[in-house]
Amino acid sequence: MSLNHPHPGTIIYEETMVPLGLTLSQSAGRFGVAEEDLAEVIAGNVGITQDLAEGLERAGFSTARFWMALQAEYDRSGDA
């Protein structure tokens, strides 16, 4: 059963990048990941990696555990 969960990349974009006015390049630097990798997550083409989850935590955006659980829930929802 699909619950139409948004892709975690959408949440990263809408809840971290937009409110702070961060560009893709700025966000990638802040989260400690390659710009191309972040772009793929934001586009919904790939899931959040452990490295990105840890980078989000270091940047003050919840915990790595939260982000990985969000990705797992998305994967289980059938929307992946």
Image (cartoon, grey):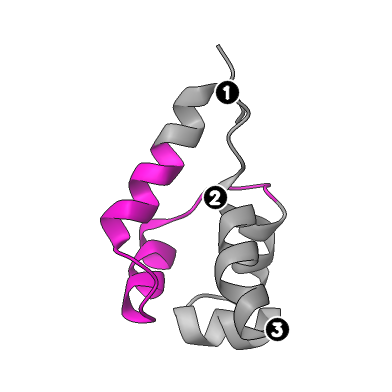
- State the quadrant of the N terminus: top right
Q: Main secondary structure of the magenta part?
A: helix
Q: Nearer the viewer, mark 3 or mark 1?
A: 1
Q: Which residue is mark 3?
A: 23
Q: Is residue 51 magenta?
A: yes
| 76 shown above or below 33 | above
| 73 shown above or below 56 | above
Q: Secondary structure at mark 3?
A: loop
Residue at the front extreme of this rendering:
19
Please state the horizontal and vertical placement of residue 61, each as a whole percent of the image: 39, 71
Q: CA distance from mark 3 to mark 2?
A: 17 Å
As rendered, which of 8 and 52 lies closer to the eye?
8
Q: Can you tell which quarter of the image residue 72 is in?
A: top left
Residue plotted at (64% across, 65% down)? 13
Res. 8 mark: 2
Residue plotted at (45% across, 25% down)? 76
Residue plotted at (29% across, 63% down)? 63
Give the residue type that dot 1 points to.
Answer: Leu
Please state the horizontal and vertical placement of residue 14, each as a whole percent of the image: 64, 63
Q: CA distance from mark 3 to mark 1?
A: 30 Å
Q: Which residue is mark 1?
A: 3
Q: Secondary structure at mark 2?
A: helix
Q: Which residues are magenta?
A: 44-72
Res. 19 mark: none
Please state the horizontal and vertical placement of residue 77, each as a whole percent of the image: 51, 24
- State the quadrant of the C terminus: top right
Badge 1 vs badge 2, beta-carbon distance below 8 Å: no
As rendered, which of 31 and 21 lies closer to the eye?
21
73 displayed left or right of 5 = left
Sooner in the amino-acid sequence: mark 1 or mark 2:
1
Sooner in the amino-acid sequence: mark 3 or mark 1:
1
